[in-house]
């Protein structure tokens, strides 16, 4: 339901025609991103990298009941807004191709250190440090 409300808010902010002209990944991705905010805040151990890995696993399974385009769009919007610091206005107005946004996300994830929740900051649990 939140997803559909966000569609209405986007149309109110941009106008119906401009909202309809947005690429699907932005329009649906932003709605999914906004709808998922509470869950993302609640589960801080579920990182962007974790969610992208799950998306890749689903993508390898092929077509199914999950709308992978929505999931992909959400991940791209989340990356642009939370990592690169884009505003709503910039996201909606900037002419960035979906593939370019995806490449930026992949580059970021490849460079980001992976934190393991059960390792201490100074060493692993198994080495006793």
Image: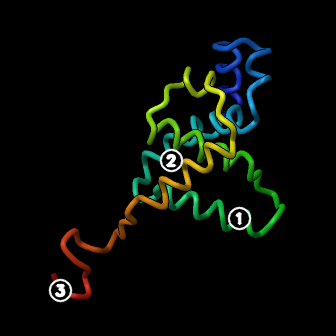
**Under tag 3, what secondary structure?**
loop
Gap between marks 2 and 1 measured at Cα:
20 Å
Q: Which mark is residue 128?
A: 3
Quadrant location of the N terminus in the rendered image:
top right
Which of the marked residues, 3 or 1, is nearer the chain's N terminus? 1
Q: Position of residue 106 (x, y in %)?
A: 56, 55
Which of the marked residues, 2 or 3, is nearer the chain's N terminus? 2
Q: Which mark is residue 98?
A: none
The residue at the point 67 percent across, 14 percent down is 14
Gap between marks 3 and 1 measured at Cα:
37 Å
Could you classify mark 2 by the number of other residues whose Cα lies within 10 Å: few (under 14), some (14-19), or many (20 or more)?
few
The residue at the point 52 percent across, 44 percent down is 79
Q: Position of residue 87 (x, y in %)?
A: 49, 26
Q: Which mark is residue 39?
A: 2
Q: Nearer the viewer, mark 2 or mark 1?
A: 1
Could you classify mark 3 by the number of other residues whose Cα lies within 10 Å: few (under 14), some (14-19), or many (20 or more)?
few
- Rendered image quadrant of residue 119: bottom left
Q: Position of residue 88 (x, y in %)?
A: 54, 24
Which of the marked residues, 2 or 1, is nearer the chain's N terminus? 2
Gap between marks 2 and 3 measured at Cα:
34 Å
Q: Is residue 78 above or below residue 20?
A: below
Q: Are marks 2 and 1 in contact (CB under 8 Å)?
A: no
The residue sitting at the right extreme is 63
The residue at the point 58 percent across, 64 percent down is 53
Q: Which residue is mark 1?
A: 58
């Amino acid at each position: 339901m939140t997803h559909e409300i966000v569609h209405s808010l986007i149309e109110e902010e941009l106008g119906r025609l401009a909202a309809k002209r947005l690429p699907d990944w932005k329009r649906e991705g932003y709605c999914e991103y906004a709808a998922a905010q509470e869950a993302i805040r609640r589960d801080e151990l579920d990182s962007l990298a974790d969610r992208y890995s799950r998306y890749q696993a689903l993508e390898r399974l092929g077509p199914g009941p999950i709308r992978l385009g929505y999931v992909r769009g959400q991940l791209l919007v989340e990356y642009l807004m939370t990592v690169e610091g884009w505003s709503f206005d910039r996201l909606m107005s900037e002419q960035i191709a979906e593939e370019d946004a995806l490449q930026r996300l992949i580059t970021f994830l490849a460079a980001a250190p992976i934190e393991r929740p059960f390792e201490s900051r100074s060493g692993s649990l198994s080495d006793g440090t």
